[in-house]
């Protein structure tokens, strides 16, 4: 059957993440550039609009000035001939006392001349027009006609970008209201004060503005490209850095895996060796012990006292060796021989430990009490072994009075802190770490029998469960052994 679960490597995820970052960064920079270009283009049109408005306002002002004076007299020249459309006005042409000929120039005539100059010098086209012009030359073009029609619909201003003779212009037109002064020339056409008489159109050449706009766009494009490159460089550098550390992590993981495998292998080998050795040793040892006991029984009275005590000591040594082998076997099996963790009721486990310790408990007259104990995820056999070791030590390292042993458990953050306290001989603080090492004992075998493996086994069991163990003690005041068991989720 095919394995349906696909393992996605962290590097693959990182690379996808980086690609995503590059795309996002490109989108951000591109969006910013597009937005900037749109803004620059809008500003160009706004600039043209401002120029057109200023030009229009000025036209209105000097026209008004002219109209305020009922027209102004200017010398008659080749370019400035008397205006035929003012022929109806008395004193259109006058002669100064010195004989100079002057002719009346009305706002329209003046504007026309100024517009001529303006177009020649700056390319700005001005036009005063209406749907009903006095001069046929003032007739509107197609765009102006539309604008004039829009004014009649109530619009005050019309503008757009248009082409005039193949060149781009910003065309602007403002409606023109008949003022009192205008009626001097335009009353004949039937206009009244306040009527919309037409419009002034101004066409601003876009070429110089577009040149400025182009420069801005180029600058912005260059700046954005640089910014994009810098960001891209940053992303690539950090990607390389992440890749490097990911590779290092993988290598370290691989090495750790190899070491763990090696350790597991050597542990398994050690365990095999220990079981083989213990099995091979146990039987002859048992035979030796039985033989020695028989020897003692049969020849106890026939040997002298030195012979008797020699046999007794040898039996003790053989028993000690049996205990040592069993303890070592227990110690070596903590790692590899453990059972899976299951929900474990600690009170039940404690009762099992106490049952195993029935004889020493009875002999010592020990009193064991405990608080309510929780359920934890653990290997129940090992947890029972752990409590058994601690309680048996509490019985063994007692003072004159009867041992009083108390077991409790306290919930702290994400773990349970268990304690086993006694009223025994206590431990000098300088040895509080050492006693958890294998074969470390603070007393000789005559004083207190033992192998020095019990606490090392406890430590191994606690660590297998993800906790830690320590002791707090005062010589002569008793000891409290603490160990923690993480409060893991129950496996379903
Ligand atoms: P063992 O009990 O076989 O000597 P352990 O590894 O169980 O070995 O203990 C190591 C040493 O720690 C003991 O020899 C003893 O000196 C000290 N010890 C352990 N438990 C206690 C206790 N409850 N009170 C005083 N000393 C203790």
Image: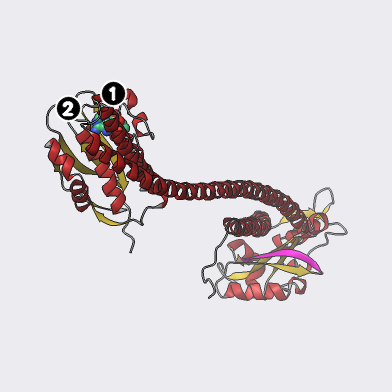
Which disc number belongs to residue 399? 2
Q: In this view, does 368 lie to the left or right of 82?
A: left
Q: Earlier in the sequence, mark 1 or mark 2?
A: 2
> Residue 48 location in percent, x, y?
69, 58
**SS assignment at label 2:** loop
Crowd class of label 2 (few under 14; some 14 to 19; many from 20; radius 10 Å): some
Q: Quadrant of residue 158?
A: bottom right
Which disc number belongs to residue 428? 1
Magenta stretch: includes residue 186: no
Q: Find the distance from the CA under tag 1 to the CA under tag 2.
A: 15 Å
Residue for point 12% across, 32% down: 402
Q: Give the range drawn in magenta.
A: 165-175
**Could you say which is closer to the camera, residue 314 or residue 13?**
314
Which disc number belongs to residue 246? none
Magenta stretch: includes residue 167: yes
> Residue 312 location in percent, x, y?
26, 32
**Could you say which is closer to the camera, residue 426 or residue 329?**
329
Crowd class of label 1 (few under 14; some 14 to 19; many from 20; radius 10 Å): some
Q: Farthest residue toward the front?
A: 302
Q: Is residue 342 left or right of residue 211?
A: left
Q: Quadrant of residue 22?
A: bottom right
> Residue 154 location in percent, x, y?
55, 72
């Amino acid at each position: 059957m095919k394995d349906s679960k696909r393992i996605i490597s962290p590097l693959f995820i990182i690379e996808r993440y980086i690609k995503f970052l590059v795309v996002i960064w490109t989108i951000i920079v591109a969006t910013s550039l597009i937005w900037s270009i749109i803004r620059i283009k809008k500003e160009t049109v706004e600039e043209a609009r401002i120029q057109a408005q200023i030009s229009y306002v000025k036209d209105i002002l000097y026209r008004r000035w002219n109209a305020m004076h009922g027209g102004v007299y200017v010398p008659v020249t080749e370019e400035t001939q008397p205006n035929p459309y003012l022929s109806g006005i008395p004193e259109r042409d006058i002669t100064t006392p010195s004989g100079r000929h002057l002719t009346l120039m009305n706002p329209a005539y003046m504007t026309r001349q100024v517009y001529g100059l303006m177009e020649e010098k700056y390319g700005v086209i001005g036009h005063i027009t209406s749907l009903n012009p006095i001069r046929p030359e003032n007739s509107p073009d197609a765009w102006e006609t539309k604008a004039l029609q829009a004014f009649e619909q109530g619009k005050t201003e019309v503008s757009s970008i248009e082409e005039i003779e193949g060149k781009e212009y910003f065309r602007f037109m403002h409606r023109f209201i008949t003022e009192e002064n205008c009626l001097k020339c335009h009353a004949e056409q039937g206009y009244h004060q306040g009527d919309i008489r037409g419009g002034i159109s101004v066409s601003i050449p876009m070429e110089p503005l577009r040149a400025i706009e182009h420069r801005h766009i180029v600058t912005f494009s260059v700046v954005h490209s640089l910014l994009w490159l810098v960001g891209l460089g940053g992303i690539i550098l950090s990607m390389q850095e992440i890749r490097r550390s990911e590779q290092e992590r993988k290598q370290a993981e691989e090495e750790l895996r190899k070491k763990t495998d090696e350790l597991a292998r050597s542990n398994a080998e050690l365990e095999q060796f220990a079981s083989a050795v213990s099995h091979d040793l146990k039987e002859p040892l048992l035979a030796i012990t039985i033989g020695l006991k028989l020897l003692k029984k049969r020849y106890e009275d026939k040997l002298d006292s030195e012979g008797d005590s020699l046999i007794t000591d040898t039996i003790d040594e053989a028993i000690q060796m049996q205990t040592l082998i069993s303890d070592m076997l227990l110690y070596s099996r903590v790692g590899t021989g453990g059972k899976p963790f299951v929900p474990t009721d600690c009170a039940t486990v404690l009762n099992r430990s106490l049952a195993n310790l029935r004889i020493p408990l009875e002999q010592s007259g020990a009193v064991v009490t405990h608080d309510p104990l929780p359920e934890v995820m653990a290997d129940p056999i090992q947890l029972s072994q752990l409590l058994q070791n601690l309680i048996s030590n509490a019985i063994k390292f007692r003072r004159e009075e009867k041992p009083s042993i108390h077991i409790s458990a306290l919930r702290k953050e994400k773990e349970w802190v268990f304690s086993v306290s006694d009223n025994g001989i206590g431990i000098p603080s300088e040895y509080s770490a050492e006693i958890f090492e294998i074969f470390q004992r603070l007393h000789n075998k005559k004083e207190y029998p033992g192998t020095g493996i019990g606490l090392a086994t406890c430590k191994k069991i606690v660590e297998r469960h993800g906790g830690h163990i320590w002791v707090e003690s005062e010589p002569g005041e008793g000891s409290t052994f603490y160990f923690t068991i993480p409060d893991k989720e129950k496996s379903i």
